[in-house]
Amino acid sequence: MGISKQRKSTKQIIYYLVAGVLLINSSTVLAERTVPKAPLPLNELRAFTEVFEKIKTDYVEPVGDASLLEGAIRGMLSGLDPHSSYLDPDAFKELQVGTSGEFGGLGIEVGMEDGFIKVIAPIDDTPAQKAGIKSGDLIIRINETPVKGLTLNEAVNLMRGKPGSEVNLTVVRKEADNNPLTFTISRAIIQVKGVKSRMLEPGFAYIRITQFQNHTGENVIDALSKLQKESTDNLKGLVLDLRNNPGGILGAAVSVSDAFLTEGLIVYTEGRVKDSQLKFKATQSDLLKGAPLIVLVNEGSASASEIVAGALQDHKRALIMGERTFGKGSVQTILPMNNGSALKLTTARYYTPAGRSIQAEGIIPDIKLEDFKVSKTERNGLSMLKEADLSRHLVKPENSDNSTGKTNEEPSLGKKKPETASLTETDYQLSEALNLLKGLAIFARK
């Protein structure tokens, strides 16, 4: 599960899928494969050399060779697609540390869109989420610096800083009628708890995966085991929450899918070269033992989240519920360079077991459900009358097994007792998933 060991070769291959960090080691060194060499584009190289010399001699300020060449490399990669980029040594080190589950920053996964920084998903229990940053927000200004024209790495560096220091983000949000919103967020050390679990009701469990990390597959299996022990009988059903999960390690996505499948393909990748053609299959038994499973997703569900949702949907093992997912089905390969930097290069596409590419399409839920804010109907503080509240109502027969909870008590007219917010009020989508899960469990029992 995850990455079993790290190779120490400088030519280690790391595969990245989607917006998050989706890694897998390869036993084949991509940089050393035999590829037919195309003839050098001499005319274009002459033009490049000429531009290089003109900048060196005529630009208003002196520019170093290293700076010019690095800029040329960044330009080559940024011109390919939004996900190919050049990682300098510092960015490469941060990327490698990012899978440990602890890092500094605001707690958001971001990407580029139309020259602005788009929030893919805020991470649970982080400063960004607590401040109110949402999936789909477009960051247009960081403090006083406009984002337009910055690279993704430059923008991310502006958002990073000493824990406890503050940063102002100006964002545009669809439902805000394009009126900019400003958030002041305190930076912090982000410690991501990848898996959270609890019982929603007796027999009905809930597992939320916030990010796919090295040990996420193992953590999900442990969580399921503990939930089984908490339940007096076998679990009747499970809600797997992948909302606002930006992705993570490929091995973790495969392990999580494998926990609910007994056989068959989980995911496969295809590219121009043989090294990018990978297949992952289920290897173990269904830990839920066939109990109903519902997967919650939204537009912040990307990368490994889409792999899990797509695999369970294609195998008809789960009902996918919520909103259309992020939709990035390309594979990035991290190629370490000799100077400590790396290239992040798009090398393949990934496909669900049924052969679907979700690139720019996303996973379409079986049951579409928007995230609403629900509140109880106000009744001026009075409860609705029931039969038991009426004077001289008939008393429940002594031999009845169904207790009404009331017999000869006084009518309950008057102010209602204060109540805690229901699941419907706090999380409408999860409440609906639980209701559907209970219905499926009843149907399965009959």
Image (tube, helix red, strand yellow):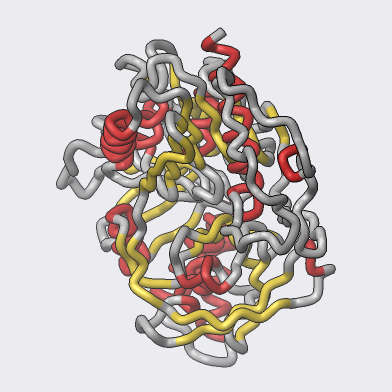
Whether residue 347 is visible here, answered yes or no, is no
Residue at 73% in and 70% down: 172
State how many labels appear.
0
> Residue 69, position in %: x, y?
45, 68
> In the drawing, does residue 16 fall left or right of residue 144?
left
> Residue 55, position in %: x, y?
56, 79
Residue at 55% in and 46% down: 243
Residue at 45% in and 66% down: 107
Above or below for 277 versus 264: below
Residue at 61% in and 42% down: 431
> Residue 168, position in %: x, y?
57, 83
Task: Report the quarter where the C terminus lies.
Answer: top right
Above or below for 440 versus 141: above
Whether residue 366 is visible here, answered yes or no, is yes
Residue farthest along the bottom direction in this orientation = 61
> Residue 11, position in %: x, y?
25, 45
Q: Quadrant of residue 339?
A: bottom left
Question: Could you say which is closer to the camera, residue 20 or residue 41?
Answer: 20
